[in-house]
Amino acid sequence: MALLPLDALTARLDNALAETPPGRCVWVALSGGLDSSLLLTLATDACQRSGHRLAAIHVNHGLQAAAGTFEQHCRQLCQCLQVPLTVAHVAVDTGSGKGLEGAARQARYAAFARQLGRGDTLWLAQHQDDQAETFLLGALRGSGIRGLAGMPGVRHWQGLTLVRPWLDIPQDQLNEAAQQRSLDWVDDPTNAQCEADRNFLRHRILPALESRWQGAGQRLARVARQAAEADTLLSEYALAELPDLCSHAGGLDVAGLMVRSRARQRLLVRTQCQRLGLPTPPAKRLESLLDQLDAAPDAQVRVAWPQGEGRLWRGRLYLLTTISAPEQWTQVWSGRTPLVTPLGGRAFSVLPVAGTQCRHDAFQAGWRQGGEVLPLKGRGRRDLKRLLQEAGLPPWERKRVVVVLTRAGQCIAALHPPSGLSWVAGGWRLVWQAPSALADLE
């Protein structure tokens, strides 16, 4: 026997709370519309039964005249339910190139990350119809299997757990449950407009599909779940295979990639990007990168995409956050107090060995400029350029090498903080120290 709408919705919340560790705060993302107002109302009862703490967060984007009405409704609802409410006012970057909906979503999630505590759980009110729309949007954009997977029911993101407990519930059941509870909510006037792609699908396309194929929305959501499962399996296979292509020096072995099929290369590169927390390259950029895997060893291959890039060097493919030349930086320094460079990471000091004389304000630290020579103990004068080549430091990292000069311009130390590589002239020693808020930047 099928559960009544309210019973089905409550059961999903109870199941979600059973998976939520004790002591974690459960937040509801409250827009003020029917779906989220119903979610908060039923969550209040569910959390009282389970003993979980409950709070709500409303993000005011300030994009329409009704924004104040939405905020006021959220305040009144939370006061009535005796649920603490956090209101976050955000500025939406309409020039980001993500479109209005995408930019608003980015601002909203940034507010969630700022306001919620690490380890907290955030409930979102998306439902089966939203999932069907997301699937169609992904298909019409030509997305791959990850894009077709739609929204996950549970996702761990920036220390939070995002949960969509009603992702398998159709909108009609939410509407019926809201009527059963005599719920009040605020309708977003823009939801009735079809200029936005999602609204066009909601009002024009999905009703037409339902009239021809009853249960079309449910079937599309089911395909999204199957795509998500397939994507998860592919990621597991790729993660098991990647260690064979990686080395302690970083990067992926190009020869190993080239003996694999092009489809497998795509999967491995995308998975490695995700593993490193990088945005995955768009399809054309990825094909361009893979086309150049057999480039000559001395070729300077670099393929960039928003916030990421791929580089080839010495038979390895490096996937990186976009690297730009560091801003001009120099620091007059005693050498004895710990110094942190603009690259962050460990602090360091340069100290004289017994018998070496120096002034306390005798040093200047800055980026490598080229032409530096280090007098190394037992090795004589060595060009820093040659030392970097021997150490296998990739060319794009050599701009981020720090050199320490005396007032007379003599180079007595060179180091690369991200990797820990360092060279010190005779008569001196370099001491690495853990980062500290007390490190002296002088």
Image (spheres, rainbow, N blue to C red):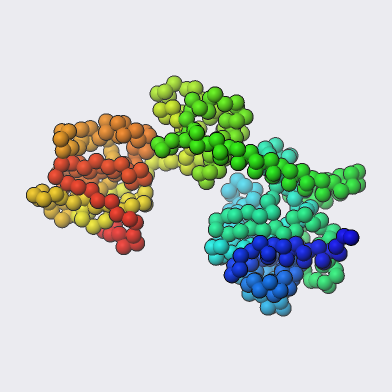
Rendered image quadrant of residue 298: top left
Callout count: 0
Please identify the quadrant where the N terminus is shown.
Answer: bottom right
> Residue at the spot x=57%, y=30% of the render?
265
How far from the left and from the top, in percent, is residue 205? 83, 45
| Residue 289 vs residue 49, the one in the foreground | 49
| Residue 307 vs residue 50, the one in the foreground | 50
Please identify the quadrant where the C terminus is shown.
Answer: bottom left
> Residue at the spot x=49%, y=22% of the render?
294
The answer to whether residue 437 is left or right of residue 289 is: left
How far from the left and from the top, in percent, is residue 195? 75, 49
| Residue 305 vs residue 66, the one in the foreground | 305
> Residue at the spot x=67%, y=58% of the render?
163
Determine whether 59 is above or below 410 in the image.
below
Determine whether 157 is above or below 54 in the image.
above
How far from the left and from the top, in percent, is residue 138? 71, 42
> Residue at the spot x=15%, y=35% of the render?
378
From this viewpoint, is residue 33 visible? Answer: no
Rendered image quadrant of residue 18: bottom right
How far from the left and from the top, in percent, is residue 84? 63, 74
Rendered image quadrant of residue 116: bottom right
From this viewpoint, is residue 298 visible? Answer: yes
The answer to whether residue 259 is left or right of residue 412 is: right
